[in-house]
Amino acid sequence: MTKRTVAAPLARGLFDVALESGDAPRVGQEVQALADLLARHADLHKALANPAVSSEARRAIAARIGDAAGLSPVSRAFLGIVVDHRSVSTLPDVARLYHARLMQHLRSVEAEVTTAVAISDERLAAMRKSLAELTGRSVTVTTRVDAAIMGGVVTRIGSTVFDGSIRRQLELLKVQLVEAGQ
């Protein structure tokens, strides 16, 4: 069974329990933090996943992590489950799938806006409002500056890209000129 096959039901079950407890956003942040922690500390990851380490020792390590991180009861229980089943390697996928489910539940999307120069807060607020109207959802916007686009805006929401950059317009113009010259 692949990590992704295991991660999907874990993320779904964790989300359902977290939603019931009223801690869904917090649990999502905590699971991502756990995934990041284990990615930064390979030895800790190995200890939690190693069948040669006794289950009592792995549980004790998980409890210390929960205490040190101040994890919610839901996240503590979840960490215990993945440690008991030596499924800690699924945490990055669980965190990603959980986040997607949370965003869907909150009727929210994430957008990445790329411009050639930094944009003002007022312009960003106007873009957020337009994107919310376009998607029918609340929008969290992250910005990037990339001088290579020359001007205009490139917006990515999920796998959909709206490319209004000058670079793209020039590429299209070049294609049209080449086709007209044939």
Image: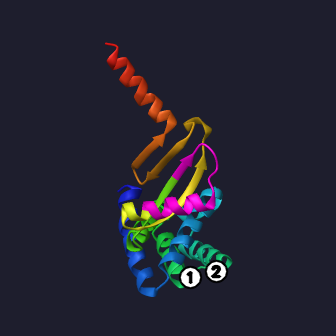
Residue 87 seen in render: no
Give the residue at x 42% y 65%: 132
Q: Is 23 on the left-hand or right-hand side of 68? A: left
Q: Position of residue 100 (x, y in %)?
A: 42, 64
Real-space Cα separation, disc 2 to disc 1, in angstroms: 7 Å
**Label 2 crowding class (10 Å Cα cut-off): few <14, some 14-19, many 20+?**
few
50 or 30, which lies in front? 30
Q: From what the image shows, is residue 1 above or below residue 101?
A: above
Give the residue pinned by disc 1: 72
Q: Position of residue 104 (x, y in %)?
A: 38, 69
Residue 17 seen in render: yes
**Magenta stretch containing residue 123, yes or no?**
yes
Q: Position of residue 170 (x, y in %)?
A: 47, 30
Location of residue 98 by image quarter = bottom left
**Label 1 crowding class (10 Å Cα cut-off): few <14, some 14-19, many 20+?**
some
150 or 70, which lies in front? 150
Give the residue pinned by disc 2: 70
Quadrant into which the C terminus falls: top left
Q: Amino acid at mark 2?
A: Gly
**Magenta stretch containing residue 72, yes or no?**
no
Q: Is 68 on the left-hand or right-hand side of 126? A: right
Q: Is 42 on the left-hand or right-hand side of 81? A: right
Q: Position of residue 105 (x, y in %)?
A: 38, 73
Quadrant into which the N terminus falls: bottom left
- Which region is colored magenta? 113-131
